Amino acid sequence: MPKDSGIGASSKRREDVRFLTGTGQYTDDINIHGQTYVYFLRSDVAHGKINNIDTSAAAAMPGVVRIFTGADFEGIGSIPCGWQVTDRHGEPMQEPAHPVLAQGKVRHVGDPIAAVVAESLEQARDAAEAIDLDIEELPAVVDMKAALSDGATKVHDDLSSNLCYDWGFVEENKGAVDEAIKNAAHVTTLELVNNRLVANPMEPRVAVGDYNRANDESTLFTTSQNPHVIRLLMGAFVLGIPEHKLRVVAPDVGGGFGTKIFHYAEEAFCTFAARQINRPVKWTASRSEAFMSDAHGRDHVTKIELALDADNNFTAVRTETYANMGAYLSTFAPSVPTWLHGTLMAGNYKTPLIYVNVKAVFTNTVPVDAYRGAGRPEATYQLERVIDKAARELGVDPIALRRQNFITEFPYATPVAVEYDTGNYPATMDKLEEIADLSGFDARRKASEAKGKLRGLGVNCYIEACGIAPSNLVGQLGARAGLYDAATVRVNATGTISVMVGAHSHGQGHETAFPQVVAEMLGIDENMIDIVHGDSSKIPFGMGTYGSRSIAVCGSAMVRATEKIINKAKKIASHLLEASEADIELKDGQFSVAGTDKSVAWGDVTLAAYVPHNYPLEDIEPGLEETAFYDPSNFTYPSGAYACEVEVDPETGKVTIERFAAADDFGNVINPMIVTGQVHGGIGQGIGQALLENCAYDENGQLLSASYMDYAMPRASDVPFYTVDHSCQTPCTHNPLGVKGCGEAGAIGSPPSVVNAVVDALQSGGHNVTHIDMPVSPSRVWAAMNNA
Amino acid sequence: MYNFDFEKPSTIADAVAALATEDAQALGGGQTLLPTMKQRLASPSKIVSLSGISEMQGVCKGDDGSVCIGGATTHATVAASASEYPALAALASNIGDPAVRNRGTIGGSLANNDPAACYPSAALASGATIVTNARQIAADDYFQGMFTTALNEGEIITEVRFPVPEAANYQKFEQPASRFAMVGVFVAKYADGVRVAVTGASEEGVFRWTEAEAALSADFSAHALEGLSVSGEGMINDLHGSGEYRAHLVKVLTKRAVAAC
């Protein structure tokens, strides 16, 4: 029987009340007395030399407070990159400067050139139009392979080329992998594109900078997934503001999906400018600005080869990927195609030899960084597509081929440097076959064919590395920050609790799920517990929310802090009950002495802690507040199996998703309803990538999909009712909750099954189509069917 | 958005007078004009809203049996009220989303003549008459290429008269992002022949597929189109589909429209 509270209960999302009744407090809702507005004049060319910026006429326009250009940021730090990748030859990546406002050159459409601060946004825009710009347009590099060719125009003149790094992993295995592929009974090769995406959270980015001259304190309100990371990066590396004089607040945030992890120039600008003019400075991105200034996602071009022996066992995988960095290195950009991608190339399979080569390339495009899944969708897509292609070439059932090669013993050390602690891949596949009703597919295909449609079935597995991350490990891999998290449990005198957490909730439901854990541990009502997050002045130094890490890392910190609370509360209870501490038991909010009917309630103990009239003051301090920092010892490894059924209209090429099923193993689940919602959202974004979304540039670096008129977001009518199951649970072995994380799974696991299904449908119609790049749009399907 | 003057006259005559100002612009439902102004891509000196003119509102039946729609009538009203011409009502009911349909007007759509708009295909396939404050214009003379019409400066579409066909159907294949017509085909069968108008596909805007009209006038069945083909030349070629693909869709959708009649 389902629980109605605590761990495992589908408690209703308490934060939805304010979101759905319009009482959320988003950054754009924040207005400070004396506030000014900034409008960024952005480059309309992809690459150009700034000969001159004349702001004199603009500065005299009504309402203008001050106009800033790159010259105002001489001596100010560069927007930093948080991860340094070392290349195949042991050399550090090429790392260009990233000024807050362009200096000397503009490098992508949308690169900010000048910032007009005025009394109103309209006045700022009017003045921006009066700025006289002399920009000499230069040839743009857009295509990654062309960017690496001899004589290619350089995005950064001070770098030796457009190559950020050439990474090999595991480099020592390269020879053995080459040999295994040469000697294989069968090799399947697939070249594919993982399409560039724009995250498009419903709330665009916003920043409000404020400065208090009285105490020399700066405050930045910003749309961030990780306020402490922003404080660290901006304070220490860009503006030189010490932590105790810098507060970063991320209030309600309307979706992040990765793109709000990063430290952006606009945040640094508003904080900097507020100090310069001694007034608050506000910026709210228009949707058009979001398209050309939010970090984009994906954009890999890959060749993958899968080698098999005569018995269809996988013997080796070799990949070569070109990963687009865009014009500058966004905060975590270098890690995405490397450590978040190469380490996942074993997938769910016991392939003994793997070699991953990644060439990261600078181009005159918007910077690319983590987007829901971040590297893991790229790994999953190529692996699960090439396995499907191999099954077709070999004439074997694609599910059977996967099952044959599943890892079945845990822990399992992959040849790509990670150790899976738990998993049960046959179980999730069994569950998938059941919930997707795969045995009924043939009948459904006949029904589709009877109405003139082609029907296809696509299946894939996925593995992901979540709970990012063990700090000592990622430090060796180039991370420039720790990736622990932190929680403070503050018990109030009457027994209610505020939990200050480093994780940030921007859709994930932390405000509901986190209290469930504490309530379970203490045996008290969830509603006695509130979560505080998003304000660096209120919360301990945690690293925020991304990489499906919140419950696995921050939740573990919260468990540790709560354990400290319980230990101290038991001491207090033993004093009140005049019993030995060892005999004190906590159950249902009551401390009792084992084997007796003596007990005190949770509230009696908490009151005693703050009104210590009868209290062991000689042994313990008053009060009941504990903090814990938690650094995971390993990643977590959620996994699953997904199935998609599509219909293809053979006349138009239009694909419709008819059925979608997901069987996930997230380990222990705190709130099944929230987990289901996370999977639904992830699948929606995965279907968006597979069928609709495409961020495209022309050869001059102009963004073709710069608005919703051309960038296709998935809508309700594009997705089916999903069948989702997470009853297969192999708990994580190394965190206290046994949780693995669920936020990215849907986006990682769904694209390959969609494309596999489309290929299956087309082949069932007699079309010899082995691959179509995403998005599998009607025109692309039609072209594939007609070799056009 | 730049500053502008605003007038909301209650008669056509007052609207025409108001539009005599240099760079004045008529406002229907604002579904194209307002986003353009917000982007600062248009800077009219004056906006003259047509929504307060009662004689330009609503759907009625003309003496000759035609469906007459006031120029300022919203898509939602056409969808709900043009029951005499079900294919037209169905087209209106599927433009944009509810917000668009409750603001956008037929006069605004036809005056703008977006190459991917739905209404031009209905007007052209129906041989509609575009009535303005100054004259009556046959649909065949009205559409003059992408975003170009026979309207003069300051001329207002006051009414559109649609002869009601024996049978008609509109098939729209949506561009995946905007959900405008990537290709839309309106087929209308009249006693004196069949008319087929195509929107979304051509660089020249809405056009009549005359070969299909001839074939269907002789034999009103999807089979009649078998031997015909449309050239991809002059068709829109963009991120969402090639000219060849759009040309292919013209035929597919025409067949479907005929089959659905």
Image (cartoon, helix red, strand yellow):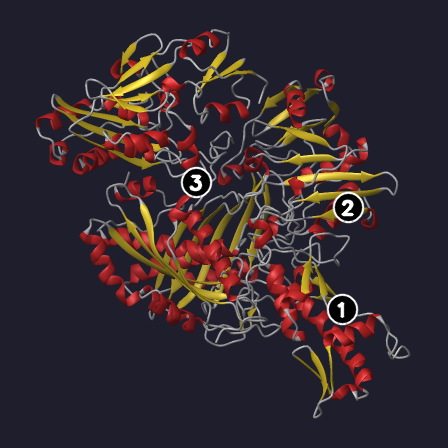
Q: In which quarter of the image is residue B55?
A: top left
Residues at marks 3 and 1, CA–CA distance in whole angstroms: 52 Å
Q: What residue sits right under mark 1 in the picture? A: A494
Please give left or right for residue A259 compared with residue B237 in the image.
right
Q: Are marks 2 and 3 on the same chain?
A: yes
Please give left or right for residue A92 compared with residue A173 in the image.
right
- Can I make out residue A358 in this image? yes
Residues at marks 2 and 3, CA–CA distance in whole angstroms: 37 Å
Residue A291 in percent (x, y) is at 54, 37
Mark 1 or mark 2, which has the lower sequence index?
2
Residue type at tag 1: Thr
Residue type at tag 3: Ala
Q: What residue sits right under mark 2 in the picture? A: A235
Q: Which of marks 2 and 3 is in front?
A: 3
Which of the chains bears the disc numbered 2?
Answer: A
* Residue for point 83% across, 50% down: A244
Which one is in front, A436 or A398?
A436
Graded by Cα atoms within 10 Å as few (under 14), some (14 to 19) or many (20 or more), the crowding at tag 3 reads: many
Q: Quadrant of residue A545?
A: bottom right
